Amino acid sequence: EIASMAIERAEKTATGIGTFELVERTSPRGTATNGADYRVIDRDVVAGGEYVYRLVTTSLEGERVVERQQTVKLTSATTGGLRLSVAPNPVRATATITLSGVTASSTVELYDEAGRLVRDLGVVTTSGTIALDATDLASGSYTVRVRTAGTSSVVERVTVTR
């Protein structure tokens, strides 16, 4: 039985793969027959970098197993020039979501820690701001996702505190 799961990251260089570091630890979800999605936002990366991510499970006996490994290369084209910020963060009641680099219609959505859509915050047609009313949200971590009509998207983690 799995006791915990972790997402780890290492920088890929011309000479190989660096040391893996913990990005996020989580409890296992799903079953052997239906699986589960795991999402993480890694803020300690830079455009132009190449990184190797891996999902590692740890059994109740302490045995670690690398379940999946994926290489990701970040470029300025990764987000299509979109930039997103949320302030203040952490959010107590309301926050302002600021978008720049928006050249097409973009959808703004709020997701909970499990990756479930909590709220559709609206559509932005040009760079600008949108309000986030968090007064009815439970304390915890959320993700704001901006997605253009094309394939570009950008996310920002938000913490709601009471």
Image (tube, rainbow, N blue to C red):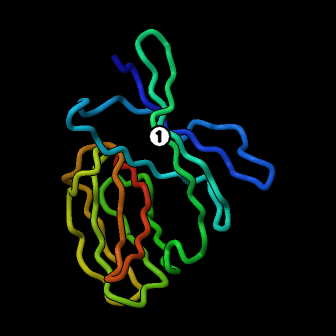
Q: Residue flagged by tag 1: what amino acid is it?
A: Arg
In the picture, measured across the screen, residue 21 lies left or right of residue 138, that is right
Image height check: is 31 above or below 151? Answer: above
In the picture, measured across the screen, residue 91 lies left or right of residue 55, that is left
Percent of width and height locating residue 119: 20, 62
Using the rendered view, name the quadrant where residue 158 is placed.
bottom left
Percent of width and height locating residue 161: 35, 45
Image height check: is 70 above or below 59? Answer: below
Give me the residue at 36% from left, 82% from top. Answer: 150
Farthest residue, direction top: 61
Q: Nearer the viewer, residue 135 or 54?
A: 54
Give me the residue at 38% from left, 70% from top. Answer: 96
In the picture, measured across the screen, residue 87 lies left or right of residue 34, that is right
Give me the residue at 33% from left, 29% from top. Answer: 28
Quarter of the C terminus within the rendering: top left
Farthest residue, direction right: 15
Q: Nearer the viewer, residue 128 or 24?
A: 24
> Would you call the spot at circle 1 few (<14 residues within 10 Å), some (14-19), or many (20 or more)?
few
Image height check: is 103 above or below 109? Answer: below
Kindly state the secondary structure of the residue where label 1 is placed.
strand
Quarter of the N terminus within the rendering: top left
Image height check: is 99 above or below 154? Answer: below
Percent of width and height locating residue 160: 34, 49
Percent of width and height locating residue 54: 52, 41
How many badges with numbers are in the image? Answer: 1
Q: Which of 139 and 45 is in front in this view?
A: 45
Q: Mark 1 points at which residue?
A: 68
Using the rendered view, name the quadrant where residue 145 is placed.
bottom left
Give me the residue at 43% from left, 85% from top. Answer: 102
